[in-house]
Each structure stands twice: as structure tokens, then as C-alpha cells.
Image (tube, rainbow, N blue to C red):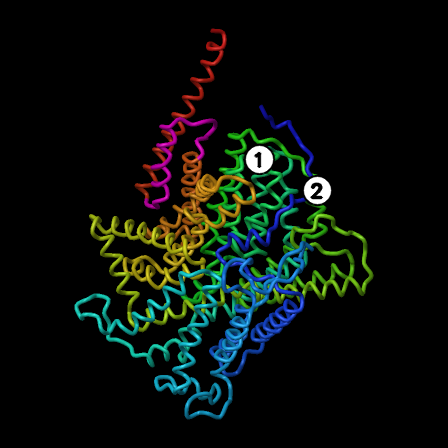
Amino acid sequence: MPTDSVAREHKLTPEPVDVDNLVADYDEERPSRHLSPRLDLFVGVWCFVVALFVLRQVFDPLELGSQYYLVFFLATTLPLVFLTYRMRGRREAAADIDPVTDTAGRPVRSDNPGIIDWVLAGVALLVGLYPVLPVPLSDIGFGGYEGFPDRQGSLLTLDIVAGPVLMVLVLEATRRTTGLVLPIVCPVFFGYAYYGGFLPVGWSISHIGLNLEQIINALYNEASGFFGVPLDVAATYIVLFTMYGAVLDRMGAGRFFVEFSFSLFRKSASAPGRTAATSGFLLGTVSGSGTATAVTLGSFARPILKRAGYPKEAAGGMLAAAGIGAILSPPTMGAAAFIIAEYLSVSYIEVLIWAIVPTLLYYLGIFLAVEIDARRFGARRVTLAIGNPLRLLARSGYHFISLGVIVFFLAIDVPPFKAVVYATATAALFGLAEAVLSRRRVVSGFDDHDVDLERMALGDSLKDYGVRLYSALSSGIRSALPVIAVCAAAGVITSVIAKTGLGQILSDVLIRAADAPAFNDASLIVLSALFSAIAILVLGLAVPVTASFILSWVIIGPALIALGVEAPQVAMFIFYYAVLSEVSPPTAPAAVASAAITGGRVIPTMIRACKYTLPAFLAPLAFVVTDNGALLIAEGSFVDVAWAFVVAGFAVAALAVATTGWMFGPTSLLERVLCVPAALLLLYPVPTSIAIGFAVLAVAVLLHLVRRRVRRDATPVEATT
């Protein structure tokens, strides 16, 4: 039987795992191409130029306004999708295959774009730039940007042609990067905008009707549609944060975060689980993707969890939960958090404040489950051959400073897009200091097992630094391409909903569906929240988090707001369920990717991931079911918020007992059953519910202690017998 005294030496070197390919296979974004070196250089330079353009816009905005910038932004990024993402999802389908190597030096096959891809890229560039091209054909179109918005409501021939062509290109880009769902849904909404006026007047979904010119005008010429809030957020927030994460990674922060986390917990049996959770939180700052974080972390944590004695499925569930937690947590949350700030017209730091209590509850649940699992599985202590945490912190702790820079500038009301640029510059400057003073090769990522610690010449070190910085800015744009495509496509849906009033109609349908079985106002809100949560999770199975949030906000948001729930609570409710779709069966991409890392069975890994993340599934319901739910997003006095957190903490502990079957030892079925209503009552933040919840939980704890005492007293008698 394993004991805590068992220790095994383990050097912090990941077992061979193809991180890039696993992320490509299991992330919600489709795998990108392996380009030949010459074409990869061309795309890299293009992305780098776009990155410089985006950075220039932060401090020297284009004089003609936001839409003018968005036209250039979409025109320069949309063609890149056709060059870097395949028409079909599998690499083997490529026609042009050349031997190249990936970033780790492994031979792979390139699949360069074909003639159709180049044509689509060229058309995308032309149609994207059409509104700003000063071609003197003003009778049929063109005429430069100054004439483009003037034609709103009275489009010319080329406007009517260019609008639908751009929509087709955006939908094809979305299909290549995220799958078929949005390219199917968007034409349905387009058709509804056109044919809704022909529906019988008595139907609730009928509307006054829009002709083709009006629809194209809304999508293409107005400052909505393609150039609406979603794309604006992508162009002014998301790409800057992806560049920041890429710079952090290229300067070695990603590897340091993982090594530092592993150095903190080295002496207890639960250390491997603790380090996995902590590493996931820190690594998510760099990654920005739950699945990518889980896979990258798994490449390091898998051998350690295995040596500690964790079953494969439990290890996979833990990795998935840690990866998802990263994009739920401040200071760099998922892309949808920026959209929340934009939709609600609040500062980004306010959104971060709303996320503090849910984040603490989420990680409380994970750490409780980790401690329990370490005892249930008899986890062994694993000794890691890595440096002292204080020494690591003194050597590379400067990587944390840029995170503090973001928080500092947000706190003094600097806009997020400027704050993240300052943080990026801070990370880059520290990287430069490292290159000048240390002159050792910086390891970014986790594919390099044998690190060359020989000092380089100053010129070589500076050259290496320049290459890394260039690569970071370029890859920051390239990694944001799927989000850009999704945000442009989402503009079709949001524009149609705004023009036709469909959002209000659908919210009325949701309220009527919840009203049928409801018997009072409180039950109506609870049922509406349950129906909404299920709808968001189902939607999230098919589309990425950003698209899931946007669609849910315009359809489900109005329904909950109409029931009296405040907008911040609704926004955070939708955000959390959109993110949690990454660990929700039957798709659960983060859990599936983690199972591929650990070698565990997929379905049990999904179930384990759900157990670890259960508090995050239930806590958002508490946001909306009562007015006191606002306390869980820090909307209230400090004392009230602290009290709500303590109560919710007991609810999370009760959930951990119910899902793991362990309190101070193995629990009985009755004790686990009692913990379920206790947790639910404690998560319903009203005094009566809280009092009953504590009483039920006290009964469960008392039964458990009495049973353990009886068993302990009876053990000697049974032994002599």
C-alpha cells in the first residue's frame, strides 16, 4: 500500500508530447496549415505588419474613426485565414505537400494553399478594402471612404455586390476555423431578415420585413454588422492580449510559471494536484485557451501525476479543470470578458472585480478535490529535481511584473487596450535585459528538453531576442484569426436581431416556456435560469466561447433582464456557462484533449472534469436567482460580499464531499446525499435557505463523525474476535 514516505526522483522534463498537434486536434479552433518555409516567412511578415498597425492605432488612431480602422483591420486579416487554414480539416487532404520541420525540429508535411485559397485571399483583400479605395467610379460604387458612409440607405451597384461577397468570405473563414455551425446559423438569420416580412401577421416571429438593400446596408455600410461591437472588441482588445501572451511566452514566462508552481509544493502527497491547479492558473495568462492550457500543462504534469499514483481519468479531469479555470480568472480572462465590458459600457477592471469571488470559489473547489483525491488514491510524494522557489523567483520573478502593470493601469482608469500595451512593453524590456545580461538562450514553450546554458555573444543574444519579439507579435495576430472570423460572422446575427427585434421575441418564448411549470415569481426565475444554462451549454458544444457568449447575450440576456435580473449578473452568468462548455459532455474538448495526454478513457475523464468544475456549474445560478446573488460578483459592501463568499465556500465544500465521497474519511451514501441539498441551499443566497442549508450540512458532518467514532471504537473488538 503506498504511503507518503515513498518518494521518487523526477526531473522536470516532459515526456514526448506533440502539444501543437494535440491542441489543433481537440481545440474548438480547426488546425492551421504547416506552411513551407518561404510562405511561412511571407505570412509571418504580413502578420507582423498587421501587429504594428494595431499597435499604432492604440496611440495614434486613424482620423476617420473606428469603422475606418475596422475596415482596414478586417481587410488585412481575413485573407490570412484562407492562407493559413485548410479548406478541409485534415492535413492529409492537402495537395501541395513538402517536407518541412516544426518548431521542435520534427519533420512534418506542409500543405500550402492552393489556387482556390489564393483567389479567395485576393478577393477578400479587394472586397475588404473596397470601402476605402479612392477609385473614381462613384456612379456605381467605390469613391473612397468619405463617400461610403454617405451612401447608407441608398446603396450603389458595387455596394450591393460587395456586401454579400464579403459575407460569403467571412462565413467560409469561420467554417475553416471553427466549423459549420455559424456558417449555417448566419444564413438562417439572413433569410429570416428577408423573408420574415412574408410570415403571417399573427405569428410572433413575423416582422415588417427588410429588402436586400436594407439588409446589406445594415451588415456592410453601417457601423454595425461586420463592423459592429464584436469585431471592434477583437480589433482593439483581443489581438492586443494575444500579442501580450505571445510576448510573455517567447520571453520564457510560460515555462517559468509552470516550473515555479511545481517548486512551491514539493513535500506533500497532494503536491502534484496542487501544482497542476496553480500552474493552470498561471499558464492561462499566456495561453488564453482552456484546451491549449490543459494540453501544455499536461505535457509537464502527466508524468508527475502518474508517479504520484493518480488514475489516468482523475489526472485528465484535473488538467481539464485547471485549463478552464485559467480563462475564468483575472487578470487576463477569456475574450468574452472584453465583450462584456463593451456591451455593458463598463471598465474592464470592473469585469475583473466581478470575477474575483467566482474565481476563488472555483479554485477552492479544485483544491478541496485535490486534497481529497490525494487521500482517496493514496497519492505518493514525488520529489522534483528543480530549483528552490525563492531562487526561481529571484531569477525569473520579473515575469510577474507585467501582470501587475496591467492591474495597476486598469486601476488608474487607463483603457485596457493601452494597459496591455504597457504590459507587453514591460515584458519585452525585461526580455531585452535578460538578453543583454544573461545571454543564455531563453526557452519558450515545452518542446526543448536539453536547454543550452552556454552564454552567447552579445550580438547573437540580441539577434535571438529580436527574432523572438518579431515571432511573438506575428504569432499574436495569427493566433487571433479564428476569433476575428467569429466576431465578424457574429455581426450578421447581432445586426439581424437588432433590425428585426428577434431578440425580444425569443426572450418572450423562453419566459413563457419557464412560466408554464412555474408556480410563483421565484420559481419562474429559477426555471428560466436553468433553461438558459442548458441552452448556453448546448450552444457551446458547437461554437467557440466568444460566439456562444455573443449569441446567448442577444437571445437569452433580454429574457433574464426582463425578469428583473441586473445586467452584470446576467453577463457573468452567460460568460461562465459559455466557458464551461469546454468541459461539458458529450464534446468537452478540454477533457478529450486531457484524456489524449494521460491515456485515460474519454467519458470517465469528462465525468471527472465535471466533478472538479461542479462549483462553477452551480455558482452562476446563484448570480441570477435572487437579488443577493449580486454579492457573489462583488456587487455590495465588503462585509456582505465576504459573508456571501464564506457561505458559498461551505457550499463548495459540501459539493466536494458529495462528488468525491470523502469528508474526514470515506462517507456513507446518506452523508453524501445530505450534502447535495445542503450545497444547493447554501448557494441560494437568502437567509432562510442559508439557515436550512447549514442545518442539513451540520447533520451530515455529525453523522460522519459519529460513524467514524463508532467504527474506531469497534475496531479493536473486531480485531480480537
Binning the other alpha carbons within 10 Å of mark 1 as few (below 14), some (14 to 19) or many (20 upward) gives: many
Q: Residue furthest left?
A: 202
Residue at the location (22% across, 73% down)? 198
Q: Is 203 rendered above or below residue 591?
A: below
On residue 555, the disc is: none
Q: Is residue 362 magenta?
A: no
| Closest to the observer, 622 or 221 | 221
In the image, is 140 to the left or to the right of 441?
left
Element under label 1?
A: loop
Q: Quadrant of residue 427?
A: bottom right
Amino acid type of the residue tagged 1 in the rendering: Ser
Image location (x, y in percent) of residue 57? 56, 75
Q: Which residue is mark 2?
A: 386
Q: CA distance from mark 2 to mark 1?
A: 18 Å
In magenta, the rendered stretch is: 660-686
Q: Which residue is mark 1?
A: 270
In the image, is 681 to the left or to the right of 166?
left
Residue at the location (31% across, 58% down)? 560
Image location (x, y in percent) of residue 526? 29, 49
Q: Is 354 rendered above or below residue 660?
A: below
